[in-house]
Image: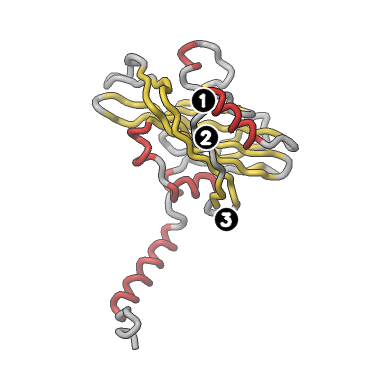
Amino acid sequence: MLLAAGCGTGAYRERMEKRLAELRRGVPGQEELSEAVQIPNLPLELRLLKGFVVELSPTAGSEHLVRRQPPFPLPGLVRTWEAHLEQGGLKMPYYFYLGLVELPQNPQERIRERIHQEWPDAKVEWKDFPDAQQRSWKRCQVVLADLDWVPLDPTGKEAAMQKQTGRMDIFLLQEGNHWIIIACRTPEALATPLRRDDLYRVWLANVKIKS
């Protein structure tokens, strides 16, 4: 009967042992996240990807920091983090943005309008994206041309600014009386190794409003 069903006892045992090993390790991806970070003066707690060790001020006006901000005004922006990945002898940056707005604001339409002001042909669609706790976020994936990127050379010094197409993953969750806004900006060439849905699900599950 097992053979007729297309599954031998060896294959069944192998799957069971693999599943047990996964349960012993816990939720995949947790080891890639930092300890919980409290956001001062805001009811927010989250865990970051361990690569995001540099936090930037969202209100700084210098050109040095402005180029690292979102390419369009992100509603309720409160924090920006920067990380790097090796590419062609340089360390190319990618970014994590955190925003928070109160109800009854709905940031979906505001984000769509702001993207279309600069990129009228950009495709902005919101789809459901459950995190590892099965909370249903709204997700938008958009490709934006001619974004500014400031890479680092092998010594850690800033190299010449580059313009490259970038990808943004934007996530929204209504939690209590707030909308949580998460956005990740990556150069298109790095998008495949960085944009991992399984890791996003774990990451988003660790972003929450403190009670």
Quarter of the picture holding the N terminus:
bottom left
Give residue 140's position: percent from left, percent from top: 53, 40
Q: Mark 3 — residue?
A: 134
Quarter of the picture holding the C terminus:
top right
Give residue 111's position: percent from left, percent from top: 59, 32
- Badge 3 element: loop
Q: Nearer the viewer, mark 3 or mark 1?
A: 1
Contact flag, marks 2 and 1 (Cβ < 8 Å): yes
Residue visible at 55% across and 40% down in the picture: 171
Q: Residues within 10 Å of mark 3 (few under 14, many from 20)?
A: few
Q: Earlier in the sequence, mark 2 or mark 1?
A: 1
Contact flag, marks 3 and 1 (Cβ < 8 Å): no
- Badge 2 element: strand
Res 70 label = 1
Q: Amino acid at mark 2?
A: Ala
Residue visible at 67% across and 42% down in the picture: 210
Residue farthest bottom in this picture: 1
Left or right of residue 135: residue 85: left
**Above or below, 199 relative to 83:** below
